[in-house]
Image (cartoon, rainbow, N blue to C red):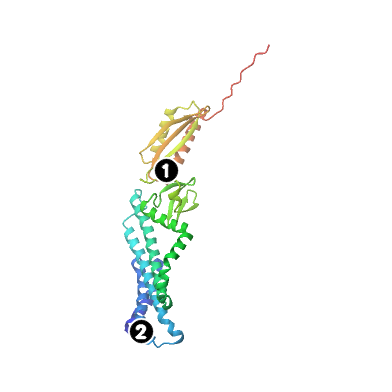
Amino acid sequence: MRFFFFACLQILFYLLPSQPIFEMKIYRRLIIPFLVTLLLVIAKIYYKGESESWEGFWSYLPHLNTILIISGFTWCLLVFTGILKRIFLKQYDISKEDNLRARKVYTQLNILQKITNFVIIVLGIGLILISFEPIRKIGVGVFASAGVAGIIIGFSAQKAIGALIAGIQIAFAQPFRLDDAVVVEGEWGWIEEINLTYVVVRIWDQRRLVLPTTYFLEKPFQNWTRSSADIIGSVFLYTDYTVPFDALREELDRILEKTNLWDKKVKVLQVTNASERTVESRILVSARNSPTAWDLRVHVREKMVEFLQKNYPDALPRTRVVLEKSETT
């Protein structure tokens, strides 16, 4: 037994300097927590008979060893859940264009892992507390008062519990997924992170909008990629009544044929409004995803304005003033 104990210890010290934990391969991240826990278990078994006679400071070591063993098992389970998630997600590529299925799986697994880790940590803390003799003796009284304590905690932490339940509901109902294009609080952005209690939205100008999960269940928001990554962008032009619409349509066709941003599905130019001074023309174009759609809208708007400036400057918005010559007697 002593030989096996020191052999495991040598293996552990051999692995520790070889590679940092965060750079290890997925399956190797479980080796260190497993070996540490195994050494603690072996030490507890090996010194079980001798530890009963220990006094003073040494008398606390068996109990400390028990706490470390429980922590080690908790550590192993947390690492194991991360390994399972990474192995499963290798089957899905979220970077490809048609990534709707991948984003759905990513969203569900991320929330599921957080829930599982939360349960594991709570159970680990509970086992550590039960390992204390005084707490174990009064355990019956504690469990008897748990109902009253649960009611008190429930009333004092309604918002936190509501946010936690909302996070679980979002994971399975999925009103949005990771990397969905959304409009929230008047801001355009993408879902960057989904947690149990809050959601992070990456705004187009790289700002981050952090919202509680309950927000998305209580208030309306726009999800532009709910059923597909494809998206239609709109461009509005305001011109004079003299503008030739057929020429605008021909120019739009020419612009789209020369760019790779357009997915060759939707291209429409329609007159949607007419005021006393200008005519409103709306251009609809489609793209593979929301970032590409943004670039395509900017490109089409710029090229159409340049076309009007160069070929039809008189068709730009103008204000007409008619001066009538008065007859003097």
Secondary element at tag 1: helix
- Label 1 vs label 2: CA separation? 68 Å
Relative to 323, say whether 199 is above or below. below
> Which disc number belongs to residue 48?
2
Image quarter hosting the C terminus = top right
Relative to 284, say whether 53 is above or below. below
Image quarter hosting the N terminus = bottom left
Q: Earlier in the sequence, mark 1 or mark 2?
A: 2
- Residue at 46% across, 84% down: 57
Q: Observer-nearest residue: 125 or 329?
A: 125
Q: Position of residue 194 (x, y in %)?
A: 42, 55
Left or right, residue 155 beside residue 98: right
- Residue at 45% across, 60% down: 154
Relative to 36, say whether 169 is above or below. above
Instruction: Say whether residue 17 is visible.
Output: no
- Residue at 42% across, 71% down: 142
- Residue at 40% across, 64% down: 118
Q: Position of residue 35 (x, y in %)?
A: 35, 75
Q: Position of residue 226 (x, y in %)?
A: 38, 46
Q: Amino acid at mark 2?
A: Lys
Q: Amino acid at mark 1?
A: Ala
Identify residue for label 1.
293
